[in-house]
Image (tube, grey):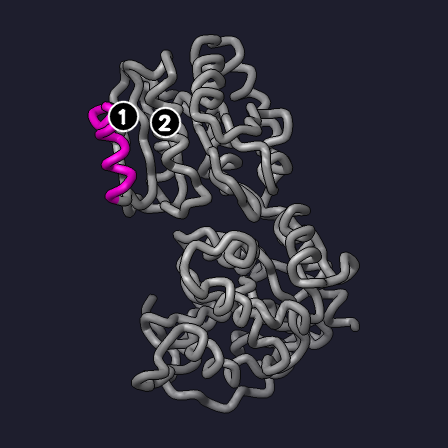
């Protein structure tokens, strides 16, 4: 993102203090009264958190009730960028690198002075919540999940994540992206239910059903074999070994291709070799976000055995694409999938293999699941996410 503003921090103009925006014309009386919102994000558009923040910011820019800026904390570039990716993009500041103290949380803290002039500051990840109390103005924090507190995957992770999440109790308002995440926050952080609003995520319009034969030509996938898809990180909670074990056991998958999008660990590759399926598994890393809709559209079945999710965006994207879904029956996943997919409450690969066979062996069932998935996914829109969030902004601003 190329900045167009002065690289040094300049005093805010009177127009900016009134509206929360760079001057771009006449400031109306209505603008004077609108709450000034900073949507603070440090993730690229391609990431899950980034998708959420960029979608909110794009819709907020067209809103009538609020005046919002997307404040992008560009850690790799050591910049504070206002409204990135728009005609009004401007570099508000450049943050000097400090040896020995150069980490992401410290960078965020040093960006705080560039958040003045806003009535409400929305921190779009729980990782930033420790800034609450130091942030100028009132704060709204989105809690995507607190899984590292519940099931840490690295030594001391619970401790340092606990520090990052420590500001959840100080925020003026919390947003949880699912009822399951709200319950986790209440249980593990001791926060009352009436301080947390549930605002589900949406699904991008790029995810929609298409002709499989046509779609498969784009990612160069075979047109004559069943394709099983999985999208997710290599975290232990994603249970990739369970996925591989189920695929190896499923009778209907003997001629199928398993496409796994996400980091492939040496352990995953070794397990595929031991199971004798290495020639039928395609491990793909670093797939661009723009290419993902083609993989969903090309798949005959999406399998998602994750043990714990804050929301579960991949199953929603699969349903929107007309791909039947088999997913784990835990945490937030049933909120997303509902009765539009097959939910499995088991960690036995044979049980998962049986469900895979049941769907792939029954074209009528697969077609019905695809239809129900598209219908259910249509109720998860980013416009709805924004409207609910906008109400929270206005309520917090009034308070």
The quadrant where residue 64 appears = bottom right
Decide if residue 241 is in sight here.
yes
Disc 1: CA contacts within 10 A as few (<14), some (14-19) or many (>=20): few
Q: Secondary structure at mark 1?
A: loop
How far, Cα to Cα, is label 2 from label 1? 7 Å
**What residue do we see at 66% from left, 62% from top?**
189
Image mark for residue 245: 2
Residue 114 falls left or right of residue 64 = left
**What residue do we see at 49% from left, 65% from top?**
41
Q: Which residue is mark 1?
A: 275
Residue 318 vertical position relative to residue 372 in the rendered view, above or below: below
Q: Where residue 363 sits: x, y (%)?
A: 47, 9
Q: Is residue 103 magenta?
A: no
Q: Where residue 80 sits: x, y (%)?
A: 42, 76
Q: Residue furthest bottom?
A: 11
Tag 2 near tag 1, CB within 8 Å: yes
Residue 153 falls left or right of residue 332 = left
Image mark for residue 2: none
Residue 95 vertical position relative to residue 141 in the rendered view, above or below: below
Residue 33 vertical position relative to residue 87 in the rendered view, above or below: below
Task: Specify the segment rendered in magenta.
Answer: 266-280
Residue 40 falls left or right of residue 388 = left
Q: Earlier in the sequence, mark 2 or mark 1?
A: 2
**What residue do we see at 55% from left, 58% from top?**
149
Disc 2: CA contacts within 10 A as few (<14), some (14-19) or many (>=20): some
């Amino acid at each position: 993102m190329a900045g167009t503003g002065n690289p040094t921090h300049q005093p805010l103009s009177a127009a900016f203090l009134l509206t929360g925006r760079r001057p771009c014309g006449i400031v109306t009386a209505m603008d004077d009264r609108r709450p000034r919102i900073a949507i603070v994000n440090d993730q690229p558009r391609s990431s899950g958190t980034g998708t959420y923040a960029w979608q909110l910011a794009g819709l907020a820019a067209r809103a009538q009730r609020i005046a919002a800026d997307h404040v992008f904390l560009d850690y790799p570039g050591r910049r504070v960028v206002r409204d990135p990716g728009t005609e009004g993009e401007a570099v508000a500041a450049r943050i000097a690198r400090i040896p020995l103290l150069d980490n992401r949380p410290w960078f965020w803290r040093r960006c705080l002075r560039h958040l003045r002039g806003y009535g409400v500051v929305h921190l779009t990840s729980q990782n930033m919540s420790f800034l609450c109390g130091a942030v100028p103005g009132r704060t709204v924090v989105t809690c995507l999940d607190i899984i590292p507190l519940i099931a840490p995957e690295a030594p001391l992770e619970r401790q340092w994540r606990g520090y990052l999440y420590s500001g959840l109790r100080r925020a003026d308002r919390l947003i949880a992206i699912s009822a399951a995440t709200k319950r986790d926050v209440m249980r593990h952080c001791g926060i009352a239910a009436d301080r947390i609003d549930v605002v589900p995520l949406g699904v991008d319009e790029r995810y929609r059903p298409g002709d499989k034969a046509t779609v498969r030509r784009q990612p160069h996938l075979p047109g004559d074999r069943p394709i099983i898809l999985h999208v997710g990180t290599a975290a232990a909670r994603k249970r990739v070994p369970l996925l591989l074990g189920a695929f190896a056991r499923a009778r209907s998958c003997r001629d199928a291709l398993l496409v796994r999008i996400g980091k492939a660990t040496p352990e995953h590759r070794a397990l595929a070799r031991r199971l004798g399926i290495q020639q039928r598994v395609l491990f793909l890393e670093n797939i661009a976000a723009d290419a993902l809709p083609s993989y969903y559209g090309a798949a005959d079945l999406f399998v998602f055995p994750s043990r714990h999710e804050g929301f579960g965006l991949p199953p929603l994207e699969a349903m929107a694409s007309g791909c039947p879904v088999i997913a784990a029956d835990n945490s937030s996943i049933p909120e997303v999938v509902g009765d539009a997919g097959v939910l499995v409450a088991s960690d036995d690969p044979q049980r998962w293999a049986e469900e895979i066979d049941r769907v792939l062996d029954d074209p009528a069932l697969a077609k019905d699941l695809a239809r129900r998935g598209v219908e259910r996914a249509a109720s998860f829109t980013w416009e709805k996410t924004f409207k609910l969030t906008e109400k929270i902004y206005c309520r917090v601003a009034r308070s």
